[in-house]
Each structure stands twice: as structure tokens, then as C-alpha cells.
Image (cartoon, grey):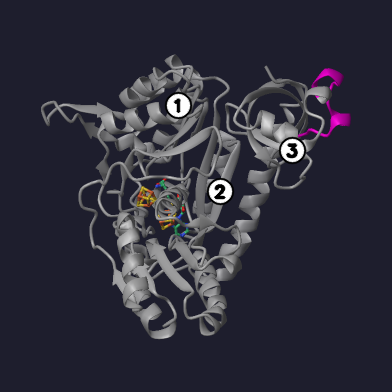
């Protein structure tokens, strides 16, 4: 029987990258990836626990697999990721979802081949979740989702314990990879044609990588790492996610100024605009410090694009606190913002705070917030109309299959048509069909003239691909 798998991934880019690694290990074991769960005999669900809607979607997905398992005893259901690091979730799976064959956590994904073989050989369940991350495991295979760009973990875990957040409990303490390991990985990727790297960590600003063959006291900073990556032949764009305002260094701002490979874009979650709420969130910066960072970033790179995360309805948030958030957004004018309703996470300090905000108040504030954020995004994007942008092509547009999409240096999504009739004559002859255009341009830089700035994306027309 053909060995096939499918992975469903919830959550952030950490999970996305973990899924790439699992896909790499399964490919090495002789499995073929299928794009639909129904065509695969091993199904893996990589979960996220950051907010309750992610939890709900996971249990919904699990429920759907029950029938299949009843009809096909060889079908294997595996669950992993952040939710599995919470013992009450694993208990719930044992009690209510007995058709799950394999449970593992965020610290032991490298054990997947071994655990999966056990399930198959013994025809029994396996549950293996490690409390803490041990040594970082290097050299795992990976099946990259994207062509031409790659996700690279530079550190794992988080030490910040923001009072609302589950991540420090599901991902453990901060551990940084050695710079030599990261550089080797990126050199190999560049050799395979990767031009853009996204450096991943919950708080990349506190990256502190010791060198393998030097004194333990010496270490590489985040900005130092970026400068070394920029030296690698073939790497043209460097991005990172996510950075915490409290640890954003002068050295990093300087690197934004000096290093052309570092893209002029930063995701800098603010969470709230009220000092009182920031304190209760344990964010360890205040509004003034945040605004000062924004000023200095804009001084270094005048057209830097800035995005953020905002939570509404944190326990104790008053209308005045909320006005402070709106006010900060008006002052900064973010290019985009991810907005979240505060969601109680069991085991975090804020879950125990007595002054939880009623749902209707949360929702009403959320709407006002989204209106403001979207209005500003649309205004900012409109300013791009008529300009020519260098776009790194990522593939077909999700909305319109005869269009391609890519990103500007500032991470703006750009969609543009590639039907022959939409292209200048010479170009159309070189790529007469959409598939040929996709084949030719994905993973390459092109010039696009922006014709329309919308709320969440830009539209344009291809003018050059050299
Ligand atoms: N490490 C990143 C954030 C990772 S989680 C950072 O600190 O910048 C991504 C976002 O989810 C957070 O920035 C926050 O806005 C949101 N989030 C986390 N926990 C949440 C909760 N309990 N309720 C609502 N939003 C939450
Ligand atoms: Fe969560 Fe805060 Fe760590 Fe980000 S920095 S992962 S919000 S605890
Ligand atoms: Fe979710 Fe875990 Fe990422 S909780 S946001 S998948 S680190």
C-alpha cells in the first residue's frame, strides 16, 4: 500500500516550520504528501493554543476523523503542537477522542519517525510529551513550503510571561541556536536558490547565540547574526518575526540603516496603548518607550512599514484605556495590525483576574478598533498607486488563479495578472500561459507598477522581470 500523509497546521510560523520538518522526516521514511486529508493514510494535526478559536477548530477537525477511523483501522491520526503541552488537553483527548493514535508535543517532533513506527508495529497508541525542551536538535530534514524563500528558526521558547499568553508554557524557555548552525543552514538554502529568509523566534531581539568553538562568555547578538547572514552570496532579503519592543536594540536600528538586505519592515506588537494595561500585561515597556522606538526606526529607514498586534478586552480595560489604544494607533499609523479579542488561557495569570470584560463590550470595542486600523491601512496603501515596486514572486494569487502574488520589501502583498493579454507583447510571448508565468517567475524578483492600493493588498501590472 502506498504510504501517504497530510498535515494540517494551525498557529504561527513556528508551527508552520515544524510542519515542514515533519514533512521532511516523513518523506525520508518513504511517505508521499497528499493535499487532502481524505487521500492520506497518516493524518497529522499540528495545533495552536494561543486563543480559544484555535482550540475549537482543532476539536472540530478531530471530530470529523472519527467516522473514517471506524471504517479504516489502518488509518492513523496524529496530533501534536502547542495544545499537547497542556495536560488537560491530553486528558481530554484520551477521554473523548480515543481514535487518536499518536500524541506528541513541541519539544520532541524529531521523535516522529520512531513514534509513528511504534504505532504501526504495535498497533497501539503512543503518547509522548516532553515537559521541557532539551538540547536543540540540528540537521533535521525539511520540506520547504515555499519556493525561493525559507523559514529559519533561530531560537525557541519564550521567557517573557506576558500575563495573557500561553506560549511560554507550550514552548518552554528561550534557547538560541549556535550562529554557525544557522549560517550553515542558510548557506545550503542559498545554494538551492533561496533568496529570502524569514528568521523565526517568539522574541528574536533576545537572540543570544554562543559560538561552538569559543568561550561561553562570548555570544552573537541578533543584529550581529543579521549582518553575517547578509554576507551570504545569494541572500537578497532578510526578515524576522517577532520582535519584542522591550528588547529592540540600538544595534538593530543601526542595522536597519546600514544593511540593505534587511527589509524595511518590522512587526512590533504593541498589544495596548494604555500604560496601566501594559503593566498588567507584564509587557515591560510603556507607551512613550514604544512611540520612541517607532520614531527612531522611522528616522533610520524613512519608508519602513510597521505592523503590530493589538488585544482588546484585556481584564480591567476601561473605555479610557481603550481610547489610549485607539489614540496610539492614530499616532503611529500602522501599515497593518492584527487585532485580537482577549481570550482566557487556562494556567496564565490573567485568566485569574477578577475584572474580565463582558463579551458584548469586547466585541463593540473590537469593531471600532478594526474600523480604524482598516481605514489607516487603506489610506497608506493608496499612496502606493503609481509607484513601481520590486516584488518577490511567491506564486499564484489565492483569490484569482490567473494572477500571481508576491511581496514588496515592506512585506505588502501585491497581486498582478499574468494572462497573455495583460502582459506587454514581448513578455507574453515568453510566457503564454498562467502556468508558464508561474513557473518562470516564482522565486524571482519582478518590477510591478502599482495600480490600486486596497485595504489588505496592492494590485499592479507587471512591467519587468529582469
Ligand atoms: N511572541 C510574539 C507574539 C506571539 S502570539 C510577541 O510577543 O510579539 C501572537 C499574538 O497573539 C500576540 O502578539 C497577541 O497579540 C496575541 N495573543 C496572545 N495571547 C492572547 C490571548 N490570550 N488572547 C488574545 N490574544 C492573544
Ligand atoms: Fe507570549 Fe509575550 Fe512571549 Fe510573545 S513575548 S510569546 S506575547 S509571552
Ligand atoms: Fe500558537 Fe504555539 Fe505559535 S500557541 S501561536 S502555535 S507558538
Q: Is residue 6 above or below residue 407?
A: below
Q: Classify mark 2: residues with Cα within 10 Å, few (<14), some (14-19) or many (20+).
A: few
Residue 165 image offset from top left, x and y in percent: 38, 57
SS label for mark 2: strand
Residue 165 visible in the current orientation: yes
Query: In the figure, residue 177 lies in which quadrant?
Result: top left
The label shown at residue 190 is: 1
Q: 389 or 212: which is nearer to us? A: 212
At 57% across and 76% down in the image, what residue appears?
64
SS label for mark 3: helix
Q: 152 or 432: which is nearer to us? A: 432
Residue with the mark numbered 2: 338
Q: Is residue 339 above or below residue 299?
A: below
Residue with the mark numbered 3: 435
The tag earlier along the polypeptide, 1 or 3, is: 1
> What is the spatial separation of the Cα atoms under label 2 and label 1, in whole angstroms?
31 Å
Query: In the figure, residue 392 lies in which quadrant?
Result: top right
- Confirm or reject: label 2 Cβ below 8 Å from ligand 1: yes
Residue 445 image offset from top left, x and y in percent: 63, 24
Q: Which residues make up the magenta segment?
A: 415-427
Amino acid at each position: 500500500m502506498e504510504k501517504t500523509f497530510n498535515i494540517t497546521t494551525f498557529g504561527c510560523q513556528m508551527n508552520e516550520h515544524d510542519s515542514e520538518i515533519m514533512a521532511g522526516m516523513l518523506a525520508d521514511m518513504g511517505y508521499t504528501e497528499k493535499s487532502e486529508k481524505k487521500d492520506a493514510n497518516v493524518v497529522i494535526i499540528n495545533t495552536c493554543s494561543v486563543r480559544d478559536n484555535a482550540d475549537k477548530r482543532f476539536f472540530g477537525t478531530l471530530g470529523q476523523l472519527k467516522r473514517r477511523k471506524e471504517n479504516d483501522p489502518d488509518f492513523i491520526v496524529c496530533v501534536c503542537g502547542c495544545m499537547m503541552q497542556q495536560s488537560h488537553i491530553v486528558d481530554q483527548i484520551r477521554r473523548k477522542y480515543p481514535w487518536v493514535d499518536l500524541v506528541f508535543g513541541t519539544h520532541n517532533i524529531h521523535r516522529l519517525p520512531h513514534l509513528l513506527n511504534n504505532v504501526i508495529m504495535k498497533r497501539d497508541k503512543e503518547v509522548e510529551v516532553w515537559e521541557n525542551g532539551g538540547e536543540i536538535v540540528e540537521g533535521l530534514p525539511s520540506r520547504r513550503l515555499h519556493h525561493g524563500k525559507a523559514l529559519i528558526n533561530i531560537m525557541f521558547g519564550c521567557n517573557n510571561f506576558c500575563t495573557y499568553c500561553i506560549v511560554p508554557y507550550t514552548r518552554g524557555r528561550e534557547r538560541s541556536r549556535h550562529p554557525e548552525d544557522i549560517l550553515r543552514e542558510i548557506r545550503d538554502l542559498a545554494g538551492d536558490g533561496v533568496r529570502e529568509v524569514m528568521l523565526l523566534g517568539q522574541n528574536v531581539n533576545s537572540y543570544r547565540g554562543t559560538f561552538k568553538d569559543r568561550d561561553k562568555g562570548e555570544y552573537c547578538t541578533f543584529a550581529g547574526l543579521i549582518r553575517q547572514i547578509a554576507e551570504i552570496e545569494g541572500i537578497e532579503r532578510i526578515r524576522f518575526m517577532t520582535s519584542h519592543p522591550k528588547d529592540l536594540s540600538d544595534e538593530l536600528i543601526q542595522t536597519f540603516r546600514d544593511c540593505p538586505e534587511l527589509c524595511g519592515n518590522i512587526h512590533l506588537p504593541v498589544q495596548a496603548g494604555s500604560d496601566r494595561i501594559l503593566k498588567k500585561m507584564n509587557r515591560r515597556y510603556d507607551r512613550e518607550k514604544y512611540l520612541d522606538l517607532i520614531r527612531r526606526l522611522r528616522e533610520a529607514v524613512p519608508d519602513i512599514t510597521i505592523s503590530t498586534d493589538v488585544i482588546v478586552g484585556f481584564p480591567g480595560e476601561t473605555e479610557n484605556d481603550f481610547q489610549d489604544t485607539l489614540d496610539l494607533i492614530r499616532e503611529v499609523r500602522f501599515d497593518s495590525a492584527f487585532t485580537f479579542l482577549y481570550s482566557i488561557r487556562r494556567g496564565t495569570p490573567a485568566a485569574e483576574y477578577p475584572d474580565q470584560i463582558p463579551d458584548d463590550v469586547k466585541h463593540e470595542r473590537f469593531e471600532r478598533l478594526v474600523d480604524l486600523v482598516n481605514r489607516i491601512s487603506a489610506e497608506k496603501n493608496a499612496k502606493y498607486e503609481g509607484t513601481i515596486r520590486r516584488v518577490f514572486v511567491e506564486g499564484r494569487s489565492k483569490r484569482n488563479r490567473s494572477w500571481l502574488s508576491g511581496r514588496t520589501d515592506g512585506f505588502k502583498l501585491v497581486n498582478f495578472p499574468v494572462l497573455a493579454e495583460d502582459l506587454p507583447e514581448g513578455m507574453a510571448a515568453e510566457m503564454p500561459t498562467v502556468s508558464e508565468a508561474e513557473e518562470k517567475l516564482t522565486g524571482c524578483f519582478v518590477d510591478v507598477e502599482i495600480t490600486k492600493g486596497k485595504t489588505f493588498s496592492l494590485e499592479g501590472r507587471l512591467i519587468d522581470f529582469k
